Amino acid sequence: MNGWVVEVGGAELLEGLDPRKVRAIEGIDPLACHVPATVIELGQWVAAYYCCPLGVTLPSLVPAAVRRGVGTKSIKFVELAVSPAETPRGLSPRQRAVISTLERRTSADGPIALESLRVEAGLATAAAIESLARRGVVTVTEQSTVQAKWREHSLPGSAEEVTLSTDQGRVVQSIGRSIGGGFSTHLLRGVTGSGKTEEYLRLIRRVLAEGRSALVLVPEIALTPQTTGRLLARLPGQSVAILHSGLTEAQRHEQWRAASQPGAKVVIGARSAVFAPIPDGELGLIVVDEEHDSSYKQDQAPRYHGRDTAIRRAQLARCPIVLGSATPSLESWHNAVDRLNSHLHELPGRAPGLSTPTVRIVDFRAEQRQWKDKRVHLIGPTLHRELERTLAAGRQAIVLLNRRGYANWVACGAGGACEWRATCDRCDAPLVVHRLREGAGASRSFVRCHHCLQELRLPKECPQCRGKVSVFGLGTQRVEDEMGRLFPALLAEGAMQRVDSDTMESSLHFHTALGRFASGQCRVLLGTQMIAKGLDFPGVGLVGVISADTSLHMPDFRAAERTFQLVSQVAGRCGRGSGGGVAVVQTFAPDAPAIVRAAAQDFVGFATEELAQRAAHRLPPAWRMARIVVRDQLEGGAADAADALANGLRGLPTSSNCRILGGSPCPIARINELYRSQVEVMAPGAAQLSALLTDARDRSLLHLGERMAVDVDPLSML
Ligand SMILES: [Zn+2]
Ligand SMILES: [Zn+2]
């Protein structure tokens, strides 16, 4: 077994341990990697706070590719061991060729690799070099390095320097003062297009100038190529390490090693880069871009939140941390506004040259009444007109629908008493219709479960009454169909691109699509929230939201917050060039506060109202929450286990100030043939929640693993 050295000390470390469970260290793994002490400490915090065994947490601190040493190569270097006067006589011509090649080199050239020496000396084999080494004329040393192959992966970004606006300058000054002054948290709320990346860049440069390193977390590099590209383009000649899931194993290992080297550098990465092995004492700044993004939360053990773990890391490293967003999470906003343990900085206006988009809410109920035919329409007259106007003016459009597939509702269309609806036989979830293009305009439909991913034929008739099957609902494929009917020229020119996880199999597909949009070859980008994140194209004059309601009716207390974020973020994609921009938001709930406030770009109003609601209902961020999900093959098994757990928790003295809800079935009560029940724990603060969970762990109420999962500060409530 491989182990982790988390502490070095004497016999006192064995106190309180069962000697039968203690093993001696046999030796050190030659591939062992050195993790800085603060990162180990961070891992211990993650294990304790997120209620995950240390043995499960520690391996996630280091990528598997690093632990397995992928891409490690051993390289031999050759140096002369004797002065020219001491060179022995009677050498073969091949040996003399080696010596003279080595003698021609200057000390500035450094040691030469054995392979290069063989080639330069014009030899077919290394036998002459080896024989010289045996005679002590040359020395051969071995060094292991990590080498990865890189394909040119162009991340767009301009190297041009930008002049800061007064607001931008003020914020850089104000955050900049805390650099070098220990731990502090800063929330930077800047409307979309206010130039947050520019702020990060100025702060990063200050830290580098002081000889320290900066760590930048972004939601997912593959999905935010522009932010990363812009930072890279503006930091020429600096050492930069990039850590994200789109890398090959060897690349990941190489970049991890680069991050662990001493010296000022920038490490940019997605969630797990929060554990980057930047040597202790070097970290001078952490930036978390788009801090509200839900991809910062890991959905399997350890279920840590990258942003909150980054705050803990900044605390351990005694450096400032900047959380940036146009639509901060209510957690961060609450900390900055109510608790005063975080400093708030605001960029109220867009950067110079950018206009504020006009947002129009369209009541889709009223629009639907205008159609005479019975066909399903997803693009209403208002959005249709704006699309025509935008395309006629030679500008570009982004069309968002946050739902994949063709339609999400397959049911009996015979009417009458039959209530059949197609659901997955392994999950309590509806099946979603997808269409596969088969060339020449032909397509084939099938249904897929978005939870267990099984695919089935689309039934031809209702299995209960043999009536006809109806397909309702929304999906990006259906919008693509309708766009093709309304704008056949777009289709013919290949000037429309659908972007969702079904079409974008890799980050390369996504980069290609973005490249075509940037060049103007593609006029309309249509897709899911992938296109709502951080994209910045000056040609975009229109953003259309097909339905703002997809996230509004989820059984989740954050539904309003998610809707507000999505609408604000996607509306912010237009008006980044001259000519302004319009966002058209179609909805069946035109009066929903989340939609009205997003259209008015009134974050503060939304956040104030929503925080009051959460506090009144004793929900996060006012209260802290943990969600415990129990799984079992039997419906009764899951329910009984959840009830027993809930009762056990209620009986603990540490639960006196807490609320224990459940056991109850999860909103999706069965996934992949396992029944799911949940217990929700609410505590007035993080300390009370931790105390209760620790207590429950110590008394063996929690059996973490396959059957039970604890999620502290959960983001997914399904
Ligand atoms: Zn399923
Ligand atoms: Zn039927």
Image: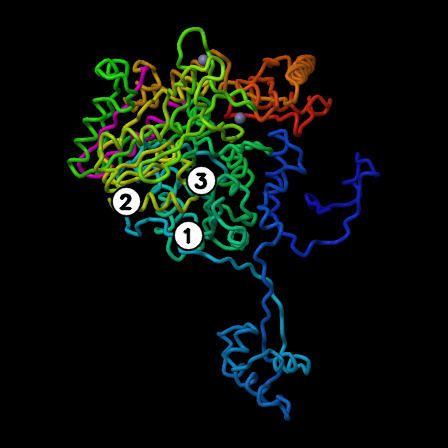
Q: Is residue 496 depicted above or below 591 in this figure?
A: below
Real-space Cα separation, disc 1 to disc 3, in angstroms: 27 Å
Q: Earlier in the sequence, mark 1 or mark 3?
A: 1
Q: Which mark is residue 220?
A: 3
Residue 91: x, y in percent? Answer: 62, 90
Label 2 secondary element = helix
Q: Is residue 487 left or right of residue 415?
A: left
Which region of the structure is painted magenta? Answer: 561-589
How many marks the image carries: the answer is 3
* Nearest-to-viewer mark from 1 and 3: 3
Q: Quadrant of ligand 2?
A: top left
Circle 2: is it few (<14), some (14-19), or many (20+) Cα within 10 Å? some
Residue contact between numbered discs 3 and 2, judged by CB atoms under 8 Å: no
**Of marks 3 and 2, the one in the foreground:** 2
In the rendered image, residue 110, in percent from the top left (x then y), is placed at 52, 73
Q: From this viewpoint, is residue 660 visible?
A: no
- Determine the residue positioned at 46% across, 25% down: 331
Q: Residue furthest front?
A: 466
Secondary element under disc 3, as helix, strand or loop, is loop
Q: Which residue is mark 2?
A: 518
Residue 126 place in picture, x, y as percent: 60, 78
Please say if 289 is above or below 613: below
Tag 1: Cα neighbours inside 10 Å, few (<14), some, or many (≥20)?
A: few
Query: Which of the two discs, 3 and 2, labels the residue nearer the N terminus?
Result: 3
Name which residue lies at 72% across and 25% down: 698
Amino acid type, callout 2: Ala
Q: Spot the residue most to the bottom.
A: 90
Residue at label 1?
209
Q: Amino acid at mark 3?
A: Glu
Q: Amino acid at mark 1?
A: Ala
Find out whether residue 92 is within the magenta segment: no
